[in-house]
Image: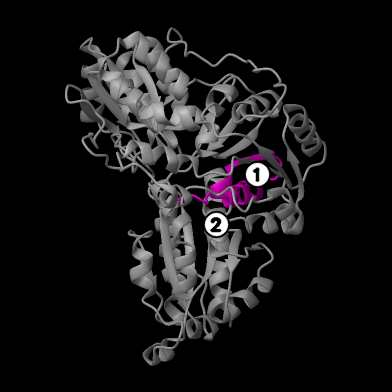
C-alpha cells in the first residue's frame, strides 16, 4: 500500500496536475521521494520560494489549469507569499502544498515551528487545511484541487505534516466533479441591455477571462452594434491581443488618467472585473475612480462564464448576427529603431521582431510605457501583467509560461529593480533549457518610486531620501549575472546591438538575457512636470487631455 506522499502524487496527476514547482526541505523529503513513483509528474526546482510560486502562477495562466508548489514550512511559505498574492489577485489556480513538522513534534515549538495556517490565509482565503492523517490526506487534496480549479481560480493551500506524508495506508482519491460555470442571469442582462438602449454613453470593462478571444469577439460585436466602448482592466491576468483580434484600451495606472478615460460615460458595465480604484491612496484624491455621474453595473461576476454572458447580452441586443462585424486590430509593425538605445526603442524592436504566438510577460514598469502601442499590430500573442503589484513576478512567470507552452517563444520584459527580487529564476531557465528571452531595462533607478515621491506630495526630498530610490551604485551587470547561472547574456547600448541580440536569441532557442542600458523614461524634467500636468487635466479641453493621455500612457 502506498504511503501518504505516493497516494497524494497519484491524486494530483489524476486531477490533471502534472507539474510541481519545488523548493523543499527536510519535512518534505517523502514527497520528494514520491516524485520517482509518478512518471507523469514533472518536478521543477527553484532556488527561491518566490520563483516556485511565481512559476506556478505563470504556468496556470497559460495552461488554464493549476500546477502544484512544494514549500518548506511557514518560513518557505513566507518567502513565496508575494507571488501567491499576485496569483490571488489574478484569480489564478494554484495548489499550494506546504510541508510541516510531524504532528507529534509541533508541541515542542522547534526552531522552524510557525502558524502556517494564519500565514496562508493572506493569499489563500478560500481554502487552507492541515491534513491530520494519512487516511484523510488525499480527500483533503482532492478538495483543494477542486477549489483551485473552480471559478474564480484560487490559491488553495494544503499543509502536509511529515508523518502524514510518510504514514502507510494512503489511498488516492479521484477528482471531484466541477460545477459548470453559468452565464449571467436574465436580470443582469436586462439591466445592461436597458442601459445600452437608453442612448447614454456606455463602456464595458473587461477583466479575467473576458480578455480571451471568445469573450473579446462577443464584446467587439456588441461594440460594433451598439456603439459601446471597450476597456480592459489595468493589469490583466492574461490578455489575447495583436493583429486579427479586437483592440481594447487598458485603464491607465495613473488614477488621474483613469478618471479622464471614464469621465464621459454614464454607465460602466463590469464583465469579470471590479470597479477601478486607485492603486494607492493619495492626499486629496479620490480612491474610487468611477465618476459620481456614472452608474456601475455588473454583467458577470468572476464566478460566472464571461464569454457566455457576453454572448447572451449580444443575443438580447440583436448583435449576434452577421450584421455586427467586430472591429479587429490591423496588422502593422512599428519599424526597426536606430541609434542610442532608449526604453521606447526597446519596445519598438519588440513590436517589430516578435514572432507570431509569442508570450509577453510584462514587468517593465515605467520602461514599458510604450509597449502596448508598439506591439498592438504585431502578430497575435498573449500578454501577462503584474496583477497584484508585488514586484518580482515577471521572471518566475516566464518560467511557468515556458513550461506550459514549450512550443511558444516567451519574452520577459523586466525592470532592473524588479529583476533582483527573483533573479534566481534565471538558474531554473537554464536548468530546464526554457525558450525564454529576458530583456532587462537597466536604467539604474527605482523610477516608479521617484514618480510616486512626486505624486504623493512628500516634502522636498534630500540626499538621504533620494538615495533610497537610487540603484546606480554599485552598478549591476545583469548579463554577467545571467552567465553565472548558465543563461546566455549580452549587454547592449544601441538599437543595432539590441536587434542583433534579439535575432540571435530567436535563431538559438533556449534561455537568453539581453541587458538593455537605457535612460529613465520619466527622468528629471518629465518627473517634475508630471504631477503638475495630472492636476491640470480637469481644467483642460477634452481633446487636449486625450492627446496628453495618449502621449503619457498609450
Q: Nearer the viewer, residue 179 or 292?
A: 292
Judge left or right: residue 259 versus residue 379: left
| 3D distance between C-alphas at marks 1 and 2 | 13 Å
Identify which residue, 447 or 199, lies in the foreground: 447
Q: Please report the bounds of the magenta region as a residue range.
A: 390-419
Q: Can residue 233 be seen in the rendering of this structure?
A: yes
> Does the stretch in magenta take in 201?
no
Q: What residue sits right under mark 1 in the picture?
A: 405
Task: Compare marks 1 and 2 and give the one earlier in the sequence.
Answer: 2
The percent coordinates of residue 36 (x first, y second) are 69, 73
Snapshot quadrant of residue 542: top left
Secondary-structure class at tag 1: loop
Direction left: furthest residue: 292
Vertical position of residue 410 compared to residue 312: above or below: below
Residue in the picture at 39% in, 73% down: 116
Q: Residue at x 53, y 81 (%)?
A: 27
Q: Residues within 10 Å of mark 2 (few under 14, many from 20)?
A: many
Q: What is the tally of numbered marks visible in this picture?
A: 2
- Look at the image and say whether residue 392 sits in the magenta stretch: yes
Q: Quadrant of residue 292?
A: top left
Q: Is residue 515 left or right of residue 375?
A: right
Label 2, on which residue?
67
Applied colour scheme:
one colour
- Residue 159 in the image: above or below residue 123: below
Q: Position of residue 517 (x, y in %)?
A: 66, 38
What x and y, as percent, mark residue 46? 62, 63
Pick the residue in front: 449 or 151.
Answer: 449
Residue 273 appears in the picture as rendered: no
User: Which corner quadrant holds the N terminus?
Assistant: bottom right
Amino acid at each position: 500500500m502506498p504511503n501518504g506522499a505516493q497516494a497524494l502524487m497519484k491524486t494530483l496527476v489524476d486531477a490533471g496536475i502534472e507539474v510541481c514547482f519545488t523548493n523543499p526541505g527536510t519535512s518534505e523529503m517523502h514527497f520528494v521521494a514520491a516524485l520517482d513513483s509518478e512518471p507523469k509528474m514533472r518536478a521543477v526546482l527553484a532556488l527561491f520560494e518566490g520563483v516556485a510560486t511565481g512559476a506556478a502562477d505563470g504556468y496556470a495562466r497559460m495552461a488554464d489549469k493549476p500546477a502544484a508548489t512544494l514549500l518548506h514550512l511557514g518560513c518557505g511559505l513566507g518567502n513565496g507569499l508575494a507571488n501567491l498574492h499576485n496569483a490571488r489577485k489574478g484569480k489564478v489556480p494554484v495548489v499550494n502544498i506546504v510541508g510541516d513538522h510531524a504532528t507529534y513534534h509541533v508541541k515542542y515549538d522547534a526552531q522552524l515551528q510557525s502558524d502556517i495556517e494564519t500565514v496562508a490565509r493572506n493569499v489563500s482565503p478560500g481554502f487552507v487545511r492541515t491534513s491530520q492523517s494519512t487516511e484523510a490526506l488525499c480527500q483533503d487534496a482532492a478538495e483543494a484541487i477542486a477549489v483551485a480549479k473552480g471559478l474564480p481560480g484560487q490559491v488553495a493551500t494544503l499543509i502536509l505534516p511529515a508523518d502524514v506524508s510518510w504514514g502507510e495506508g494512503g489511498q488516492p482519491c479521484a477528482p471531484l466533479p466541477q460545477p459548470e460555470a453559468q452565464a449571467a442571469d436574465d436580470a443582469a442582462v436586462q439591466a445592461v441591455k436597458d442601459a445600452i438602449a437608453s442612448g447614454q454613453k456606455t463602456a464595458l470593462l473587461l477583466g479575467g477571462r473576458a480578455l480571451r478571444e471568445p469573450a473579446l469577439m462577443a464584446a467587439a460585436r456588441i461594440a460594433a452594434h451598439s456603439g459601446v466602448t471597450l476597456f480592459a482592466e489595468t493589469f490583466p491576468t492574461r490578455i489575447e491581443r495583436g493583429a486579427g483580434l479586437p483592440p481594447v484600451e487598458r485603464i491607465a495606472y495613473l488614477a488621474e488618467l483613469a478618471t479622464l478615460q471614464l469621465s464621459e460615460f454614464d454607465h460602466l458595465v463590469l464583465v469579470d472585473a471590479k470597479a477601478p480604484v486607485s492603486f494607492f491612496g493619495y492626499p486629496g484624491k479620490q480612491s474610487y475612480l468611477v465618476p459620481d455621474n456614472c452608474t456601475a453595473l455588473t454583467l458577470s461576476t468572476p464566478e460566472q462564464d464571461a464569454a457566455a454572458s457576453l454572448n447572451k447580452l449580444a443575443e438580447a441586443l440583436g448583435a449576434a448576427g452577421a450584421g455586427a462585424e467586430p472591429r479587429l486590430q490591423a496588422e502593422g509593425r512599428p519599424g526597426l529603431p536606430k541609434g542610442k538605445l532608449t526604453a521606447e526603442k526597446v519596445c519598438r524592436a519588440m513590436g517589430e521582431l516578435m514572432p507570431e504566438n509569442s508570450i509577453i510577460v510584462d514587468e517593465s514598469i515605467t520602461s514599458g510605457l510604450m509597449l502596448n502601442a508598439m506591439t498592438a499590430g504585431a502578430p497575435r500573442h498573449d500578454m501577462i501583467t503584474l496583477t497584484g503589484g508585488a514586484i518580482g513576478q515577471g521572471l518566475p512567470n516566464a518560467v511557468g509560461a515556458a513550461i506550459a507552452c514549450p512550443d511558444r517563444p516567451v519574452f520577459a520584459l523586466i525592470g532592473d529593480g524588479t529583476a533582483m527580487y527573483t533573479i534566481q529564476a534565471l538558474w531554473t531557465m537554464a536548468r530546464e533549457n526554457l525558450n525564454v528571452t529576458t530583456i532587462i531595462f537597466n536604467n539604474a533607478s527605482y523610477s516608479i518610486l521617484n514618480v510616486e515621491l512626486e505624486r504623493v506630495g512628500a516634502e522636498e526630498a534630500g540626499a538621504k531620501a533620494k538615495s533610497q530610490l537610487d540603484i546606480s551604485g554599485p552598478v549591476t551587470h545583469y548579463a554577467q549575472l545571467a552567465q553565472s547561472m548558465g543563461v546566455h547574456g549580452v549587454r547592449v547600448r544601441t538599437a543595432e546591438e539590441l536587434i542583433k541580440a534579439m535575432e540571435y536569441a530567436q535563431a538559438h532557442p533556449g534561455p537568453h538575457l539581453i541587458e538593455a542600458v537605457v535612460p529613465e523614461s520619466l527622468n528629471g524634467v518629465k518627473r517634475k512636470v508630471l504631477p503638475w500636468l495630472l492636476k491640470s487635466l480637469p481644467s483642460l479641453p477634452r481633446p487636449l487631455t486625450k492627446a496628453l493621455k495618449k502621449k503619457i500612457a498609450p
